[in-house]
Image (spheres, helix red, strand yellow):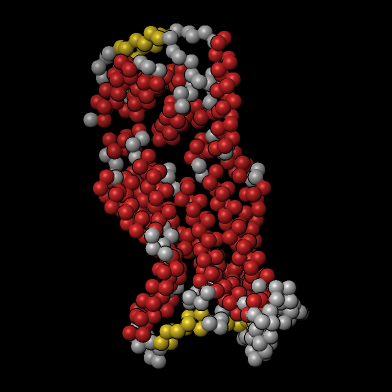
Amino acid sequence: MRIVRYFFSRWQNWLGLLIVLMFTVVAISAPLLSPPDKNTQGSFKKVGRSSDRTPHPPSETSILGTLPGQIDVYHTLVWGAREAMQFGLSVAIGAFIFGTLFGSVAGYFGGFVNNIMMRIADAFLTFPVVAGVVLLQQLVAVTIESLGGIYWLNNDYFGRVIDFQFTPPPFAVFLMKVDPILISLIIFSWMPVARIVNTMVLTLKNKEFIQSSRALGASPAWIIFRHLIPNSVGPAVVLAARDVGSSVILQATITFVGLGGASAWGILLSIGRNWIIGPGGGLLRYWWVFLPVTIAIVLFGVGWNLLGDGLLEVLDPAANAYGGTSMIKRKQAKGKKEAQSASDSKSIHHESDSVAVQTATQGISVTLQNNPPVSHSQEKHPVLQVAREAIAKKDFEHAIHAYSHLIKHRRNLNEIRQDMIEYVREHANEAVIWTLLGDVLTQEGKMEYAEKAYEHARNLTQ
């Protein structure tokens, strides 16, 4: 709940979410907001004589005016929102799924396999998206014509047209339903997702909980889908959210320049552009020709980008551990605490303690007589409580995450060492607990005892 409260504490997140919800409601309610009739064809509706090639201003029959051919701007704006939402989500989900799988598999196997797969991703990155759209569209056109059909692009408002004088074969029917731009954008949009996930997996696969899973006999597929992907997709989700808006903008752009797209919003701009930049046109004279659809496209892109920025902080694994605190605020708080601890450390006396660690299988009692170094922060860290609750529930995966974070940053080492000593007595056969004990002893400089803890962990995993 703290993460949710933090998300809604920023006005940018509210704005992005409200914009996305607005387009979602419009897309779902399109049949109610602008019911189709006999003059409707797809996302376009005629409200006057088709021979009238002059755009008319807003009126009772068309509240946002009409384009040449008396195409209702309002109707196309509403139904175009539904098409944009479907198109953007399809591209984003497709690129996210393929990129996540590609990057995680490459990162898990590493070495030569990772190098080859990442070079393939780099090769796709160097290929222009527009060139891919044109290439795939030409392949579809050639295939349709080779099967006896007719393929052409109607620059009015129909988009691409495919016609057969006979019953088309099944493969031709499939090609008629495929959107070349959608497939092209998926093919050329997964690489950033794959690279981010790959980097995260390369870092995570050497963590203790992954090593423990391998030692327990988990298969590569289980490790990838159960551990690596859930812990590395946060930044990828952010990219996917942003791809929803950017893919719709790119689709409208491709449609506007006449490369065969079927974006309703792009077709609106294409039909009305002569009344904006033509000899008799003007930006203010025929504002309804371009202004409503331009605002819609801009808001669609801005909304998804703002939502993606908000998800970036919410889905940051470190932010989750801190209850939703942003990275910047955490660093600021960390600096203040370290400065305070530096001034307070002069008055803190080191206390010696004696703890016996009884090994479960060898009966060796190791006594640690030490003057432990004071942790960087004497205040109990909130992640420490999270770790203790997780390990009390025997949720070793989340406990390892939390304890490893504290040990890495030398936070509350005294408390962690005491926890580990207590836990190895209760869970003497858990190698991960012995490994964490070795980690904290290493941070405290007790290499002799740390090596004994590591050795015991290795014996348990053999």
Figure check: 459 above or below 75: above
Quarter of the image for residue 454 reads top left
* Residue at horizontal 35 percent and vertical 15 percent from the top: 446
Extreme-right residue of the structure: 60
Across and down, in percent, residue 119 comes to 32, 54
Residue at the (38%, 73%) spot, across then down: 135
For the N terminus, the image quarter is top right
Left or right for 173, reference 270: left
Q: Looking at the image, which is closer to me, 332 or 434? A: 332
Q: Residue at x 65, y 56 (%)?
A: 18
Does residue 64 appear anywhere in the picture?
no
| Quadrant where the image shows the C terminus | top left
Q: Is residue 363 visible?
A: yes
Q: Is residue 400 positioned above or below 95 on the image?
A: above
- Image side of residue 17 versus residue 361, left or right: right
Residue 363 placed where, x, y %?
A: 27, 14
Q: Position of residue 70 (x, y in %)?
A: 66, 84
Q: Position of residue 436 (x, y in %)?
A: 37, 26
Front in this rendered view, residue 151 or 105: 151
Residue that extends furthest to the front in the rendered view of this protein:
279
Instruction: Determine the image quadrant of residue 296.
Output: bottom right
* Rendered residue at 50%/74% (across/down): 261
Q: Is residue 286 above or below residue 84?
A: below
Count of numbered badges drawn on the protein: 0
